[in-house]
Image (cartoon, rainbow, N blue to C red):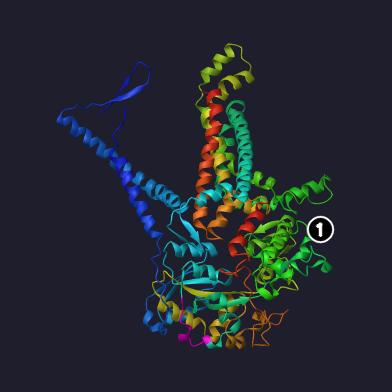
Amino acid sequence: MRRRPSTHALMFAGLSIMGLLAAACSTSNSTTNNVVAAAPNPASCKGVTLHFIGFPGEDGKQISGAFQQKYHMKIAENTSADNDQMIAAIKIGQPYDLMSVPMWYAQRMIAADTLRPIDTSVLPQWKNMFPGVAKNSLIEAGGNTYGVPVGWGDGPYVYNPKLVAPNMLPKTILDLLNPYWNKRYILFNSSSNLSLIALADGYTAASGTSLTKAQFAKVTQQGKELVQHAEAFTTSYSDGTDRLVSGDAALDVGGWEAMVNFAKAKGVALKYGFFGDYLGGWFDSLGIPATATHSQCALAYISWLMMPKNEAALASYIVSGTTNSLSVPYLAKSDRIYDYSRVDHIVTPTQDVTTFPDPTPGNTVPAGDATLQDWNNAWLQISAGL
Amino acid sequence: MTTATGTASGQHTLASPVGTSPAGWKARWRIRTSTALLLAPATIYFVLFFVVPLGVLVLFSFYTYTNFDWTSRLTLSNYSQALTNPAFRAFYWRTLWVALLVSAIVVTISYLFSYIITYVLPGLRRALYFLVLVSLFGGYLVRIYAWRTMLGTFGIVNKTLLAFGLVSHPVTSLLNSDTAIVIAMVNFLIPLGVLPIYAAMQNISPHLFEAAVDLGASRLRTARTIVLPLSARGVKAAFAFCFIGTMAEWVTPQLVGGPLNQFVGNAIQYEFGTTLDWPLGAALALTLIASVIVVLGLLAIPLRFVYR
């Protein structure tokens, strides 16, 4: 016998429909991406709490106590999010006023409509920023700038010197295909590893990371071997440090100088080095998410953070290079992990100019070249063991 | 008030005390309303935190992805990719194989353990049962990291092997391998395997054993013809817990697996995260759910015939 739908079944169905409709509506882009342009004035932000999502320390909360006190503002941090979670949080409409914008994800964040453009002309310190970061196309789109760089670094590998013979240190990433390195190195699960191979093959000198299909096929094949010979994918810099400290891996391809400090705290000495052909480099910016409710105050705060003394403190706190050329004198000797002697450009200990190459193709590439989708698909095949 | 009544088939039904009179309708309406109100909190919770998210996932799986964003133009191409891309198939097969292996190991160990503490060492039942449950108190990640430490190149396992002269160099294939994933998952899931099997064994009447012994059945025959059929539901539940838990894994392969030991969960995470292809990620997730249901359904068929 057919049963009539009961009261709670009807209620259940009704709520389901309402929920689905609400969910469907939430997927439409309801964010506003107007340029954040007014001249910043923190005095008008009394009582405001700026909500930050991103990497630990990059919001400057720990170095801006005086500012927060003076203007009665607060910084609320959510530093548990990684790149993907940041984008996801903004896409589903969570209100944040500040967000880390790592250079490798900046174009994706912009394309995904998660960032608001910033009128840099209202930032007094913008003209003093190192051009290598401030004028970088990775944080620009359609003539707009979407982030204010707060820290930068180079792209070293990090290794455990007790487990690596000095004469075996790799000159290029392809040296890791030597049997000596079999199951002894770790790397991030990212298609950007292919860019290091392309660089070693000499494909990227002229054309950035835009590769022809033939070039890309060769790079993919080498990438396959690289992953087959790897010990593991690492999930974070601290995970990489743990694996090097425990001796389960001898070298981490995607390293950071700060890992040496992390390991020192665990009583193990690690070292870092560079692939000879890798100019490398990274920089992170602070951006204003599309869901920001206090965008003007966020910009005022960013403007304060950019001031020479403050930027020096922030860069030191996040163990990175400073992005403001006037900040260099404020860096303590122990915090000068990079060579600022030639301040026309940002320089690293081993190379003249850090050019911050995009490790994967841009959102658009010349016709016939491998697209970012091709790179991601190729990496998927590689990690599936195909 | 309701009363329980017997039927010809021996089953019990609830006879309604209300008739078809207006008073009866009123009483029935009152019962239904109060039932609905009692069910409302759980229903709302279920709808909000299960049905709606699942609905959103279904909706997304039909969306079109273009250049790091998606549009509501509906398409089946995400499912087509999820089912035909060789990389995803490889991830599915690997996950399925490991999940079946882990579930089989967990169910076997859990069954033997439950049998021993129920029938062989009943005096130690509570203590041993507590020991199994106690492992649930430890954090999941803590246990994964513990295994990483133990199975590592310079971990306790390798140190022991070296100390006993069983190997001349540390075995590097213990960690970052399928072996490590299986060991960590089995360790994590054993309490979830023991719980339903142990509970099922507790419900078996001791009179059946007395009868079996009186009729001259050996311990092995008693176990095979009485314990096993009557605890089959617990076995099925344990297997389902382990299988579903392993199929949905992605953290364990990431932390103790090698670069080529990733699960379909890692592929889903890659699509949601790295490529931002949420529609494809949603299609993969739903395909995973469907495949779990299909596999469990297929496995249930032979069990149904063997142990009705």
Residue B62: percent from the left, percent from the top?
46, 52
Where is mark 1, residue-wise?
A179
- Is the magenta region chiefly helix, strand or loop? loop
* Residue at point 53%, 18% (across, down): B208
* Residue at point 63%, 16% (across, down): B218
Residue A314 quadrant? bottom right
Query: Up-down: is A42 above or below B194?
Result: below
Residue B202: percent from the left, percent from the top?
52, 28
In the orientation shown, which residue stands out farthest toward the front? A367
Frontmost residue, A205 versus B186 = A205
Can residue B197 be seen here? The reply is no
Q: How many marks?
A: 1
Frontmost residue, A270 versus A112 = A112
Q: Residues within 10 Å of mark 1 (few under 14, many from 20)?
A: few
Residue B264: percent from the left, percent from the top?
59, 49
Residue B227 quadrant? top right
Label 1 amino acid? Pro
Residue range corresponding to the magenta coloring: A117-126
- Report whether A281 appears left or right of A310: right
Frontmost residue, B236 versus A13 = A13
- Is residue A122 inside the magenta stretch? yes
Query: In which quadrant will I find the N terminus of chain A?
Result: top left
Query: Up-down: is A107 above or below B305?
Result: below
The residue tagged with tag 1: helix, strand or loop?
helix
Residue A198 quadrant? bottom right
Query: Up-down: is B92 above or below A92?
Result: above
Q: Which chain carries label 1?
A: A
- Is residue A369 inside the magenta stretch? no
Residue B86: percent from the left, percent from the top?
62, 49
In the orientation shown, which residue stands out farthest toward the top? B215
Query: Up-down: is A377 above or below B23?
Result: below
Can residue B12 be seen here? The reply is yes
